[in-house]
Amino acid sequence: MSELTVLVIGSGGREHALAWALSRDPGVRAVHCAPGNPGTSRVGTNHPLDPMDGAAVASLARSLASDLVVIGPEAPLVAGVADHVREAGIPVFGPSGAAAMLEGSKAFAKEIMEAAGVPTADARLCVSMDEVVTALDEFGPPYVVKDDGLAAGKGVIVTGDRDAALRHAAGCRRVIVEEFLDGPEVSLFALSDGRTVLPFEPAQDFKRVGDGDTGPNTGGMGAYTPLPWAPPGLVEDVVATVIQPTVDELARRGTPFVGLVYAGLALTSRGLRVVEFNARFGDPETQPLLTRLKTPLGRVLLAAATGTLADEPPLEWGSGAAVAVVLAAAGYPDTPRRGDVITGAEGEGVFHAGTALDSRGNLVTAGGRVLAVVGTGDDLTAAREAAYAAVAEVSFDGAFHRTDIAQAAAAGERTKER
Ligand code: AMP
Ligand code: GLY
């Protein structure tokens, strides 16, 4: 039964969760991670590697006799690392550089959505401050200004302050100014083999750094699944109106999307709208989602990589809930402090992101989002309790976290009502 050798590229919390879920798949014989982190070394074998070097990734995959390569982060995907692996004849879960532009350029994503008839915020691409001023005045407050390129979740400002919107725009090369979307946000992931898509259950991510959705945007401070407040038929609706048309449009252009389509959605008073696409598993949604996924992960990722998703049954999920709380380092999301010693991070459900081993072998902080701690339970209330109890076991100087992840949903409310 154990057959697959899988190589996971990346070193964040999502890669730790991917490696962990792959290691639990009875069809997977060996999990390798490159470069990985101290967490992935608990569930697989780490290899030093520059994940941006496509030739090096393909060569490592070959030397390990990998049956499947899974590329976690957006930067190597946009840089075309998956193309190198595919050219080497090795199945790869992760889009080509051309298809990853769905995340790599917000302007490209808007062009695809327009061509595919996918609902999204009305937007203007601006290349001068004059154009920015015109667009801000056209849409009015609250102002939404986005850096066109990759910015690790921090390239977006949503503000009522026109001067702050202008300052953010001045720091970007090409900016998108767009209409404000009201309503709660949902993250929906779907596997794609270029033609067929297989959706996950929805999750919700908390992007702002502070409790009550205050402070600047981050890569994500916590997440939970399922969403008890989600309207019935949401997943089918998003697949039919957003994900399948997007995948079809990319295929029509000769750049099929093989990998994970992440649709960031707003359920607005005027209906469903796409906020953004990512071209890979979201972080920290991946940690609670993979904790609940019952379908063996290696098998479905390989089916996506080899074009056989149409033969796969729907994904299966555990009946309970899962909540992830991110422990961040002092200073995040600006310049996080590094090198603080971490204790209590050994438990199941503790996923490493910004961690490293120092010269004495201590586990230390090495990035802004240090750990994502996942708790599970029969419902969101129980899963929150488990997550926050596990958070209390972990400590490092300067650690902080949000205390309200999944709180409103557990209390039976819709969240992020704006
Ligand atoms: P993005 O990187 O495009 O996902 O944006 C990061 C976050 O900014 C989103 O998760 C939303 O919370 C917020 N945001 C982005 N675009 C809009 C919009 N048009 N209206 C309201 N909020 C937005
Ligand atoms: N959780 C949002 C992201 O992965 O970009």
Image: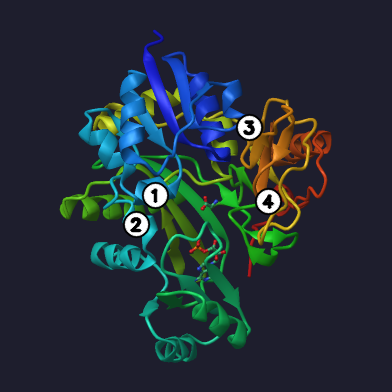
For label 1, the crowd category at 10 Å Cα-Cα, with few meaning under 14, some 14 to 19 and many 20 or more, is many
* x, y percent for residue 220: 61, 53
Q: Earlier in the sequence, mark 1 or mark 4?
A: 1
Q: Circle 3 sits in a helix, a strand or a loop, which is it?
A: loop
Q: Which x, y percent locates residue 330?
A: 76, 54
Q: Is residue 274 above or below residue 61?
A: below
Mark 1 or 4, which is nearer the eye?
A: 1
Frontmost residue, 245 versus 301: 301
Q: Ligand 1 closer than 8 Å to the CB at disc 4?
A: no
- Residue at 73 percent across and 26 percent down: it is 346
| Number of numbered labels in the structure image | 4
At numbered mark 4, what does the secondary structure look like: helix, strand or loop? Answer: helix
- Circle 4 packing at 10 Å, graded few (<14), some (14-19), many (20+), is many
Q: Which residue is mark 4?
A: 409
Estimate the x, y position of residue 198 in percent, counting from the top left.
36, 38
Q: State the residue at coordinates (63%, 55%).
A: 206
Q: Residue at x 72, y 37 (%)?
A: 364
Tell me the quarter of the picture where residue 303 sits.
top left
Pointer 2 with pointer 3, Cβ within 8 A? no
User: Which residue in the structure is indicated by mark 1?
Assistant: 279
Q: Which residue is most to the top?
A: 1
**Towards the viewer: 216 or 117:** 216
Between the residue at mark 2 and the residue at mark 4, the CA separation in whole angstroms equals 30 Å
Which label sits on residue 299?
none
